[in-house]
Image (tube, grey):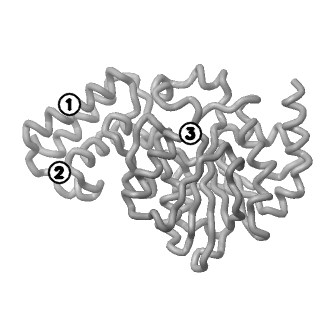
Amino acid sequence: MTKEQLFIHLVEELSSTDLFFGHSAIDAEDEAMMILMHLFNESTSEVLNSGSSDVSETIVNQAEQICYQRISQRKPLAYIIKKAWFCGMEFKVDERALVPRSPIAELIQNQFKPWFSKENQSCTALDLCTGSGCIGISMSIFMENMKVDISDISMEALQLADENIKKYNLENQVKAIHSDLFENITGKYDLIVTNPPYVSNDEFAELPQEYFAEPKLGLVSENSGLDIPVRILLRAADYLTEDGLLFLEVGYSDELLNDTFPEIDFEWIEFLNGGEGVCVFSREKLLEYQPVFSKFIQQQNVL
């Protein structure tokens, strides 16, 4: 069997069931490619360029075992092969944190242009609710002059993030902080980038089975999913430099934010590579709307 034939076989197997694709892969072809990248330790282009090469029986058996686990357990593939790719880079992944997946990758690869203009200067960033650390670590690689703090409420997630920091030898550029949102954050940053929990409990109960393998702490937020995002919007200005920016991902909750705060003109980013639900705020705008966000939090606490 050749690599190409094995790829086709895996696609057929993965397509034959009602698997959900969305954890760093969009379809069966994506996941089949990830299995081959894992087994051969090759990039996508390397796999494609060697499609006619023969595959050993051992590799075929390993691929079929991974495929069987994916179908029988309904776990995200990343948790089975213990890795995922973000911004074109490989990250260690397991059940301690969510599988890396975010349109913020496109912003990182473009150095947050046109909103951010300090990419060639010494600057600082905070990756809030970091999980595996993929966003903050990728920022430090694509923006070499940037010092990055990454934070999470979960010590287990931070341990995983620290392993990824060491994987890329970034101990002098990226620092992990255990913090419930801004609780243990003391600095001011040119950029705060965050993909926090924004799924309501009701929505979580209806998600495909694959999501239940992930830590619920990284997905669910109270008050219809808006509690954590709005708390970030309320406090972020206090941790930004004068011309600092906040990039906040809320996924499909973007419409709910628009409806909840009609007085706010959210700037939603359009992505070339797919994705939605990421807004950007200047420190000035966050300060302007602090009373609005504060009122929402106070009202929710009364209910």
Q: Residue at x 29, y 26 (%)?
A: 69
Give the position of the N terminus as an image quadrant.
Answer: top left
Q: Gap in Å between the C-alphas at discs 1 and 3?
A: 34 Å
Residue nearest the viewer, comparing 207 with 16: 207
Which residue is identified by label 1? 64
- Left or right, 221 with respect to 21, comes to right
Within 10 angstroms of label 3, few (less than 14), some, or many (20 or more) residues?
some
User: Reading the chain from its start, which is encountered first: label 2 or label 3?
Assistant: 2
Q: Position of residue 143 (x, y in %)?
A: 52, 70
> Amino acid under label 1?
Glu
Which residue is identified by label 3? 154
User: Reading the chain from its start, which is encountered first: label 1 or label 3?
Assistant: 1
> Amino acid under label 3?
Ser
Q: Residue at x 23, y 52 (%)?
A: 41
Q: Position of residue 11 (x, y in %)?
A: 28, 35
Quadrant assignment, res 205: top right
The image shows residue 256, relative to residue 109, as above or below, that is above
Q: Residue at x 75, y 55 (%)?
A: 267
Q: Position of residue 50 (x, y in %)?
A: 17, 55
Within 10 angstroms of label 1, few (less than 14), some, or many (20 or more) residues?
some
Residue nearest the viewer, comparing 9 with 214: 214
Image mark for residue 51: 2
> Amino acid under label 2?
Gly
Quadrant assignment, res 198: top right
Residue nearest the viewer, comparing 72 with 149: 149
Q: Gap in Å between the C-alphas at discs 1 and 2?
A: 18 Å
